[in-house]
Structure formats: structure tokens, C-alpha cells
Amino acid sequence: MATEDQISLFDTSPAAPAVDATFDRELIPTRASVPIPPGIYASIAQMKPHCDRCQRCGLAAGRTNAVVGAGNLQAPIMIVGEGPGQTEDETGLPFVGRSGELLDKILASVNLVREKDVYICNIVKCRPPDNRVPTMEEAEACKGYLLEQIRLISPKIILLTGATAMRGLVGIKDGITKVRGQWIEKDGRFYMPIFHPAYLLRNPSREKGKPKWLMWQDIQAVRAKLDELLPADNEAAD
């Protein structure tokens, strides 16, 4: 249960850090050795052209489209996946196809709507070959973009779908089954590791204790936490 002091952390959005005026932002998409300073982008739209032509890691060579993200730019919930798959690479949109359809159903089960309540992105913006797991170097090269997305969207809750997202944002190296459904408070936000929808498609049983049943418990906890953090919005909706 969050304390009043914890909830008050969300009352004010911090101002963007000052960026050194001498920093050449056009160097960002050229190589991974160039840092992505906090506050360098004023919007996701300003960041997108850099992602579209980024060469910070080798994944750029195989991409059709960079998959930056999609959803409400003021969403209270952010979902962070691993990386784009083939359909995502072709469309430039995250979580489409069967995984995206299942995600929409999971959200709808607790009255959440992707376009209204959620912003979705990935640890890396470009598709790893054969949908392999991104390497640590690839994830690190792209991390600055993701941190800027978190700063700009300023979600209250971040859902981490899979081990790569857990390791990249909260430093957890355990398997997802050990930590899924647990809240991690960091930097004034609440993180929860959850199963990736693709994993649920491979494990369709709804039996108690199975991944789909566990996902139902987790998404209800997410709904309850959101209601706790946004009581005024809920009262207005009533």
C-alpha cells in the first residue's frame, strides 16, 4: 500500500533537465558513444526522426521501420516490451498481430483502453534478426531514447513484459516467473513485471496457477493501483 508521501510524488511533473547548449543533438543517431542527455527532446515527435535514421547499433542495418511507440502521450500506464517483431517492423507500430489483439483483450478485461490509458514501446526500436533477444549492447545503445519517452510521457505505472525489459529498466536478472506481479517502486513510479502476450499465446491454459490465470491476477492489481493513484479521475468518471 502506497503512503501519502509516495502518492504525492506524482503531483508535479519535474521540469526537463537543462541541456548543454554546445551539445550537438544531430550526433545522437550516429553512434552509441554519443550520450542521449535527459531533456534533449521536447516531444516524442521531435525524437522520432532520430530513431528513424539511428545507427547507434547494428540493428539499424536490418530494419524496415523504427518502432518508436504508440498510444496516449499522456497515458498513466506505459508498457515496455523487448523489441519489434516482423509485423511491427513492417508497420512501424508496437504490439500488433495476435500479441496485440490479446493485449487489447487483457486491458479491456479491467476497463482499460490502449488508445486512452496506455503508451506502448520497446527496449529497442529496431527488430533483432529472427526475433532474437536484444543484446545488452543493443539495449544500452537505445536506452536513452526509452528514458526520454518515460520522462515525456511521465506514466505512473510501467509494465515490463519480459526479462529484457526488467533487466534494462529495474536491473532485475531473475526469470519473469519469479518476480511477475510484484511492484517495484523506483524514481517515483511503480513498475511491475508481467508475462509477454506472446508467451501467453504459447501457454493458452486458463487453469489456476498457469500463466494466463496469473496474468489475470496481475492486471487486476494494475487496475487497483491505478485507481489508488488517480482517485480524483475515478470520482469524476462516476
Image (tube, grey):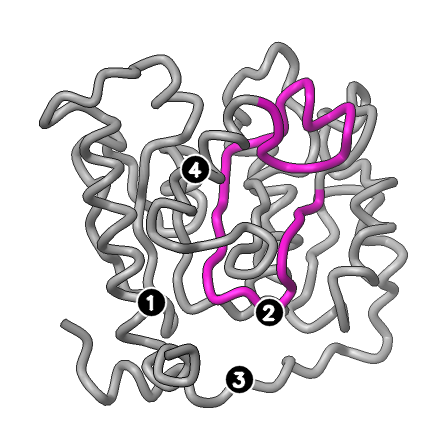
Pointer 3: what residue? 13
**Relative horizontal placement of residue 13, taking residue 88 as reference (left or right):** left
Q: Amino acid at mark 1?
A: Leu
- Image coordinates of residue 143 in percent, x first then y, are 59, 48
Residue located at (87% from left, 50% from top): 49
Pointer 2: what residue? 74
Q: CA distance from mark 1 to mark 2?
A: 14 Å
**Viewer-proximal residue among 102 and 149:** 102
**Relative horizontal placement of residue 160, taking residue 218 as reference (left or right):** right
Up-down: is 135 above or below 149? above
Residue most extreme to the front: 238
Residue located at (42% from left, 29% from top): 197
- Image coordinates of residue 217 in percent, x first then y, are 19, 43
The C terminus is located in which quarter? Answer: bottom left
Up-down: is 85 above or below 101? above
Is 88 a magenta residue? Answer: yes
Q: Which of marks 1 and 3 precedes in the sequence?
A: 3
Disc 3 or disc 1, which is closer to the eye? 1
Q: Secondary structure at mark 2?
A: loop
Pointer 1: what residue? 226
Q: Which mark is residue 11?
A: none
Q: CA distance from mark 3 to mark 4?
A: 31 Å
Pointer 4: what residue? 105
Asked which quadrant contains residue 54, the reply is top right
